[in-house]
Amino acid sequence: MAKRPVPAGTPEASLPAHVWGLVKDAVPPMHKAGRPFVAVALTAGLFGWRFGWLRRSSLVAAGALALFFREPKRVPPVLAGAVVAPADGEVALVDEAVPPAELGLGDQPLPRVSIFLSVLDVHVQRAPVAGRVAEVAHKEGEFLPADVPDASVRNERNAVRIETPAGVAVGVVQIAGLVARRIVCEVETGHELSLAQTYGLIRFGSRVDTYLPAGTTLRPIVGQRTIGGETILAVLG
């Protein structure tokens, strides 16, 4: 079995430690929001261990939940001014739209990239730019514009405005669907975010919109798959 190169002067790990290191690198860590769900599934399996069907179902459920809440490491680009995708998924819209009022980005259409996340995608959200969190606003109800056919089933969104050190404002909006019904946002106004830093997640199916300054050239195309924290959506001047 080939071994990873070891920097000079570093003690070589034992075989078990080496294998464990490979496993940790290959299996993404789980976001802390998923721990209660996995714990419930494992507890159900523990108490129902005598019943094969319950034991198997619980273990499968625990594994599926751990997979859903995975938080893989990402390496953001070093390109100056890069705006990265805030989520894994498929680009559903590349257009201009009026941003949610709570973002405080004005009432004129701005360049927007919408990413749809299926239940199989990584569901953590990452900061599209580095900067200070200037606004965090949560809203519930039927509120999406007419460009979303199933707007009547949408029920929750969380908007975050990030201002870069250069004073450029970028908005990112988590939108939960009928099944999701729960958005987790871990930042507050005044927090500093690094590029691609995890700041929240949406449970079980969702969409994430990114609003950029007027005149920004958007790089993605509809149908493209994005990698959160790595795929470049645009480059700010």
Image: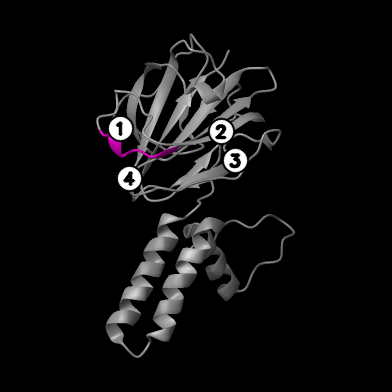
Label 3 vs label 1: CA separation? Answer: 29 Å
Residue 51 falls inside the magenta stretch: no
Residue at 64% over, 58% down? 6
Please tell me how crowded label 1 is: few (under 14), some (14-19), or many (20+) other residues with Cα within 10 Å: some
Disc 4/disc 2 C-alpha distance (Å): 20 Å
Residue occupying image coordinates x 49% and y 59%: 34
Q: Which residue is mark 4?
A: 178
* Colouring used for the render: one colour
Circle 1/circle 2 CB separation < 8 Å: no
The secondary element bearing badge 3 is classed as: loop
For marks 4 and 3, the one nearer the N-term is 4
Looking at the rendering, in which quadrant would you find the C terminus?
top right
- Name the foreground residue: 100 vs 218: 100
Which is more toward the observer, 142 or 26? Answer: 142
Q: Splitting the image into 4 quarters, where does residue 136 fall?
A: top right
**Total number of numbered discs in the rendering:** 4
Front of the two marks 2 and 3: 2
Estimate the spatial distance between the alpha carbons at disc 4 and disc 3, rounded to whole Å: 27 Å
* 101 left or right, relative to 153: right
Badge 4: few (under 14), some or many (20 or more) residues near its Cα, within 10 Å?
some
Q: Give 10 or 172, whichever is nearer the viewer.
A: 172
Give the residue at mark 2.
137
The first of marks 1 and 2 along the sequence is 2
Q: Position of residue 221 (x, y in %)?
A: 33, 23
Whole-percent x, y for residue 69 in the image: 46, 55
Which residue bears the numbered disc 3? 197
Mark 1 or mark 4: name the one nearer the start of the chain. Answer: 1
Q: Which mark is residue 151?
A: 1
- Specify the segment rendered in magenta: 150-156
